[in-house]
Image (cartoon, coloured by chain):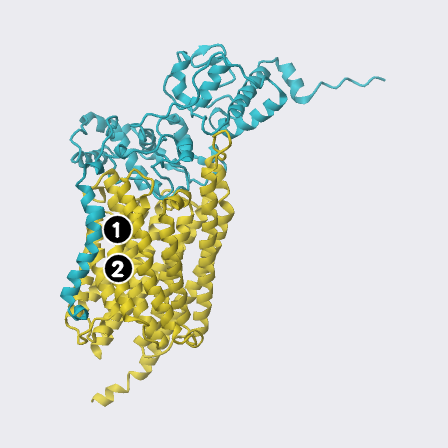
Chain colours: A cyan, B yellow
Amino acid sequence: MAGEIYKKPVAFSILAAVVILAGSIVTMGYPMLRGDMHPRLENLRPFTPLELAGRDVYQREGCSNCHTQTVRPLRSEVLRYGEYSKAGEFAYDRPFLWGSKRTGPDLAREGGKRPDGWHQRHYENPQAFEPRSNMPSYAFLKAARLEPAEVRSHYLALAAFHPEMKTGEGDFAALSQKTEMDALVAYTQWLGHAVARRAGGPALDLAARNPLGDSPQAIARGAKVFAENCAVCHGDEGHGQEGVAPNLIDDVFLGEKGDMPDGAWFALISGGSDAKARIGRPGDPGGGMTAFAGQLSADDIWSAITWVRAQQAHERKEPAELERLEHGPAKQPEKH
Amino acid sequence: MNAYRYDDRTVQGFILSAIFWGVVGLLIGLLIATQMFTPAANFPPYLTFGRLRTVHTNGLAFGLGVGAIFGLSYFILTRLCRVPLAFPRLARAQLWIFNAAIAAAAVTLLMGKTQSLEYAELEWPLDVGVVVLWLMFAANVFATIARRKEPQMYVSVWYIVATVIAVAVLYVVENLSIPAGPLKSYHLFAGVNSANVQWWYGHNAVGFVFTTPILAFFYYFLPKSTGLPIFSHRLSIVSFWSLVFAYLWTGAHHLVYTPLPDWIQTLAIVFTVFLIAPSWGSVVNGYYTVGQDWSAMRDRYLTKFFVLGITFYALQTVQGPTQGLRVVSQLIHYTDWVPGHVHMGTMGWVTMVTAASIYYVIPRIYGTTIYSEKIANLHFWLVLTGQLVFSITMWITGIQQGALWKAVNADGTLKYTFVEGLARNYPYWHLRALGGLVFLAGMVLFVYNVLKTIQKGKALEAGAAPSPAPAAA
């Protein structure tokens, strides 16, 4: 009789265990035996000791409580962050750090998007970049030196799973000169390296002309676009920030004197750093220019270019004329 | 009789410990709710949101939740088996180790020693301690059942046995890792596999810490405190087996649209939708039990705790499966909707039923009545209001967030930057903290009422103590 089982605790417990384990075996145990649970992209490279130390800091500070590391295959998500996440990107992630909440943005494609200096300053004081941000300050990481012996033992424990993780003893010793901030920035730049970024923006068209010209409406709109999107790195007036982003007002662009054609400006803003190589100037081919193609409309980008040009023209004027522009024409002494 | 006395002291010890960790966890909850809109309320390195959130979740799930599970399970088991606990001294040792473990958990999490696995953050030496604790619990549960004087095992016993078995399997597999230092380890599983193991565990930790033991309380304390028998034993049987079977298939609904193979996601979604049935089996059983005589709602102050508790369980178990659907998941996943969902379960279902069970147990340990029904009623209305404000504001802001993230202009560009979406959460985050504050006020009344009842019971005991002595002599 079926009711008898409720009088037999041993039989009951065994039956309960079997019923509980059924789903576990099918959805958790069995998949482990399949190759598609252990993929690895060819481009994926393991952490360096510095990057691993940074990942340890990321774990310790609980960054995954507010940031995810997986881009979903949704249109808006690919526009915002970049190529959606692939299973083969996470072969070294023990554990995975995908998170479950986006109080802050996803970080899966953060690597290579911005320069190291941007990240350092942002970790130090997030509100300096975005006053509306609710991220805590991590300035204390700058003062914390890495412990080479500790990083070494962590690295070797992880390397036990991954024979290809090899590094010289010297690499560990060198870590004593590095801070936890350096490590966290290095790890941030590691994120998403195995997947090629989507080629941002349209093809480079050096003959393209700014369709907005220099109308006052375009300048006003460009001022707003610049303040909301560009000033964070390039400064409120476009003078750049040391180690973060170059000056847009001086006369040197991508390592060469002289302004770039409209089409190059447009390609650089819409495509980000990826467009640099195509422009054919000698400047640093790496770096951290964000691709704005998904976030700004073509007219937004053109208006920002208009504003930068107006700003350049403004600042190249004589000081006296500047004074007059800012404070209106000097008053003539009244005649008697 | 003496043996029963001794067991109940341990039961009370677990209940008081659970309440203590509960208050700590709620205060931290209030601090992190404030940090959401005041970055200056972070005090690095120890008191930042990133570290405190895990102290909050661990303190409440393992301090309040598991503490209450230990204590109330022992109370229920001894009554249903009609024998004292098999190993009372082991249970007493378990009580001390439990408190030491939760204290060590809080300290190490504040130090940033975490495995970064949700609800399994504790590092490996603490995991060893948790396993030891669980084995002590299992030994007492099984040995007490083996010595029972009542041949039939009641529904609550089934749920306790299922909890003991499932949590043991889940916790051990999830925490398999390679130690890299005294308080540092790397997961044995990597990448997508690590994710799959984690959410198999994470979802079922909810199932077997926040569902099955609470159902054990519900099936025991609801009839006890209303005087009404459970409506249908057959429904209890069907719900039990289908719940413990279906739960374990559903973890991957936390990983919808991630790189986890699609078939695992789809299988999880299918079972998640099915899970409505066994959950509602208990819901229906609860309603029809009280439905035999609704005047219990008016005459017995604990009835409303159980009825509202099972109501939130009902809502929770429909909302959860809805969230699992791909079309809903893509809107609300990763938003504040999810904490709204979780807190309806924990504040509405788990805490409501657990508090009512404690209100039932504490006076009975001393053969007295509750200190104040009036305070208990006020506690009820405060936690109900606080929880509703909390959950509803989070659902609204979650939908808003999801919609702003997805909004696209006609020319195919995004309409809002990330921070524009974030900035619109602030009013709701203020309201959420307010809801939490009201909830905390209710819980403070609960603690006061429990402590006053114990004081009253002790005074009674002190007054009654001298009389048996001469009788014995």
Query: Which residue type carries mark 1?
Result: Trp
Using residue B232 as the reference point, say whether residue A21 is left or right of it.
left
**Residue A186: which numbered mark, if any?**
none
Q: Position of residue B235 (x, y in %)?
A: 29, 67
Q: Secondary structure at mark 2?
A: helix
Q: Residue at x 38, y 72 (%)?
A: B290
Along the line of sight, which residue is nearer the eye, B208 or B120? Answer: B208
Q: Position of residue B96 (x, y in %)?
A: 24, 62
Q: CA distance from mark 2 to mark 1?
A: 12 Å
Chain of residue at mark 1? B
Same chain, labels 2 and 1: yes
Quarter of the image for residue A15 reads bottom left
The residue beneath circle 1 is: B249
How dense is the environment of label 2, judged by Cα within 10 Å: few (below 14), some, or many (20 and up)? some
How dense is the environment of label 1, judged by Cα within 10 Å: few (below 14), some, or many (20 and up)? many
Using residue A296 as the reference point, say whether residue A99 is left or right of it.
left
Along the line of sight, which residue is nearer the eye, A249 or A178? Answer: A249
Q: Secondary structure at mark 1?
A: helix
Q: Relative to residue B368, is residue B324 depicted above or below? A: above
Along the line of sight, which residue is nearer the eye, A166 or B243? Answer: B243
The residue beneath circle 2 is: B242
Q: Position of residue B163 (x, y in %)?
A: 24, 60
Quarter of the image for residue A98 reads top left
Chain of residue at mark 2? B
Quarter of the image that includes the N terminus of chain B: bottom left
Query: Which residue type carries mark 2?
Result: Ser
Q: Relative to residue B27, is residue A202 depicted above or below? A: above
Quarter of the image that includes the C terminus of chain B: bottom left
* Mark nearer the N terminus (2 vs 1): 2
Q: Position of residue A181 (x, y in %)?
A: 34, 32
Extreme-top residue of the structure: A257
